[in-house]
Image (cartoon, rainbow, N blue to C red):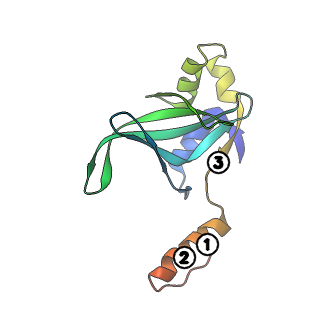
Amino acid sequence: MNISFGTAESYLREGEHRFKPDTELDLKQGVMVIIGAGVYLPHFHLTIHEGLICYEKQEREWKPEYMVTAIFDKESGELLCDEEGEFVECVFHWQEGKVSLEELEKERCEIEGILTCNQKRDSDFKEERQNGKNSYCR
């Protein structure tokens, strides 16, 4: 899906989307849980995700401490920057003001990591078959 970068974050947060699985990035004292869906900025070759910083586990689950915006190099997958704040604001800081906030908000981007109807159906089907139910995509 191709939309403006200024609307991408709210699109991901407000919609009832099913995302690809989250991933964990090891940190010195914990992990950053990277949310499965993200935003690709082709002009900058960046992928932006929400991340949860977690320092301890409780009952085999990581306990979130705070949220960050994580900026990755699209080609290498290297984490370039993470900070608390909105997507546009964080990319603006990372770019050190080389591009205005207004330009970034208008920049075209692509939403990645949202499962399609077939992917939902397939994952739901596998999950529900394990629970003895049938599934289909409407």
User: Which element is circle 1 on?
Assistant: helix
Q: Residue at x 33, y 49 (%)?
A: 62
Question: Can you give x and y, in whole percent of width and height, for residue 113 in the image?
Answer: 61, 51
Give the distance between the C-alpha atoms of the residues marked 1 and 3, in whole angstroms: 18 Å
According to the picture, the residue beneath numbered tag 3 turns out to be 112
Q: Residues within 10 Å of mark 3 (few under 14, many from 20)?
A: some
Question: Can you give x and y, in whole percent of width and height, for residue 102 in the image?
Answer: 65, 21
Residues at badges 2 and 1 in contact (C-beta under 8 Å)? Answer: yes
Q: Residue at x 62, y 59 (%)?
A: 115
Q: Residue at x 46, y 86 (%)?
A: 132
Give the distance between the C-alpha atoms of the residues marked 2 and 1, in whole angstroms: 6 Å
**Left or right side of 22 for 7:** right
Residue 31 in the image: above or below residue 103: below
Q: Which mark is residue 126?
A: 2
Q: Residues within 10 Å of mark 1 (few under 14, many from 20)?
A: some
The earlier-in-sequence mark between 2 and 3 is 3
The earlier-in-sequence mark between 1 and 3 is 3
User: Which element is circle 3 on?
Assistant: strand
Image quadrant where one finds the C terminus: bottom right
**Left or right side of 33 for 19:** right
> What residue type is disc 1 on?
Asp
According to the picture, the residue beneath numbered tag 1 turns out to be 122
